[in-house]
Amino acid sequence: MGNVGPLQLALIIGIALLLFGAGRIAEVGKGIGEGIRNFKKGLRDDDDEDPSKQLPPKTETKEEDTHKPA
């Protein structure tokens, strides 16, 4: 298969406009944009949910021996 030239691209866009109409194509473009945005946001949120980054470091407390022999 060869490269798609400007004439072929214009023909594909023209056919898409005839089949779906300009309004429907705008809705599809908007949906694709929102999907990409949500995907990127999900990737950023996934990094933020890393437990080692969210939890404060654990400090070990030593229990004092209160049961000393009398």
Image (tube, rainbow, N blue to C red):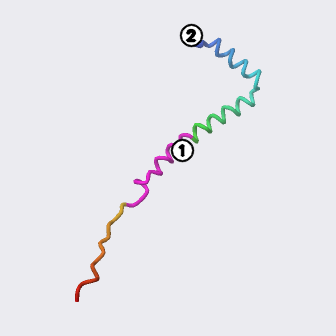
Please give the range of residues in magenta. 39-56
Residue farthest toward the bottom in the current orientation of the protein: 70
From what the image shows, is residue 63 above or below residue 58?
below
* Res 32 → quadrant: top right
* Magenta residues, dominant SS class: helix
**Figure quadrant of the C terminus:** bottom left
* Res 27 → quadrant: top right
| Residue drawn at 44 percent across, 51 percent down | 50
| Residue drawn at 49 percent across, 47 percent down | 46
Give x and y (percent) for residue 40: 53, 40
Tag on residue 65? none
Residue type marked 1? Gly
From what the image shows, is residue 23 above or below residue 6?
below
Residue 18 among magenta residues: no
Is 51 positioned to the left or the right of 42 in the image?
A: left
- In the picture of the structure, the residue carrying the numbered disc 2 is 2
Tag on residue 42? 1
Residue 48 among magenta residues: yes
The numbered mark, 2 or 1, whose residue comes first in the sequence reads: 2
Is 36 positioned to the left or the right of 57 in the image?
A: right
Give x and y (percent) for residue 10: 67, 16
Give x and y (percent) for residue 49: 47, 51
**Figure quadrant of the N terminus:** top right
How far apart are labels 2 and 1 at the CA level? 37 Å
| Residue drawn at 62 percent across, 13 percent down | 6
Residue farthest toward the left in the current orientation of the protein: 70
